[in-house]
Amino acid sequence: MKFNSIINFFNALEPVSDELIEEVKQYASTLTVSKNIRLYPDGIAGENALFIVSGTLRKYTFIDGKQITLSLYGENELIGYTEISHYLEDEGLEVICDSELILLPKDLVETLYNKFPEVDKMVRKIFSMKYQKIVHESRLCRLPSAIHRYSVFSKTPDRYSLPARILASYLLMREETFSRLKTRYKKEKCM
């Protein structure tokens, strides 16, 4: 794993210069991380933007002793170093399954932004993608029942193959409810 995936991601947003690519190759770093590793607050996410080459991460918090999954991040997704909100005391970011990451230090991100005009256009497009994700997650959590939330989630193209406990907390339901709905939907598809 090197930097091809992030360069392809950038080029899909806006064609980038060879100089920008060289800056990324020089100052970014790659990292392979095993599942269940915390990247925030005790890890590398505080001062680095993270690009997920492969694997899945989740942002979570604890409320009344229960872990609640706030957001899921997958392949070819960029997580900004300011994306952990700090609104909740126990908020964290962890690796759910073995992942390959590219670390973009805060100084590098700021240098790229100031030095290369194409980065401004890329950032606006990234913010647009982040906004769409937040709107989707907001709509999902506002649905009145577990069956509605599971129904919408099961139709989304970026569904994740993750442990039931994580998906259940993401969909605001108990693990037993999640398993029951999953079984029910599988049976309905077979009919």
Image (spheres, rainbow, N blue to C red):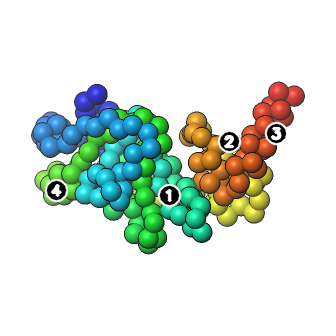
Which amino acid type is marked by label 3?
Arg
Which mark lies nearer to you, 4 or 1? 1
Looking at the rendered image, the disc whose residue lies closer to the viewer, 3 or 2, is 3
Q: Position of residue 23 (x, y in %)?
A: 13, 42
Q: Residue at image x 50%, y 62%? A: 61
Say whether marks 2 and 1 touch (CB < 8 Å).
no
| Numbered mark located on residue 60 in the image | 1
Sort mark 3 into few (<14), some (14-19) or many (20+) by Cα contacts within 10 Å.
few
Task: Determine crowd level at label 1: few under 14, some 14-19, many 20+ residues with C-alpha closer than 10 A.
Answer: many
Give the image quarter of residue 91.
bottom left
Q: Upstream in the sequence, badge 2 or badge 4?
A: 4
Mark 3 vs mark 2, CA separation in Å: 15 Å
Nearer to us in this view, 142 or 15: 142
Mark 3 or mark 4: whose residue is earlier in sequence: 4
Residue labelled with disc 2: 155
Q: Which residue is mark 3?
A: 184
Label 2 or label 1, whichever lies nearer to me, is 1
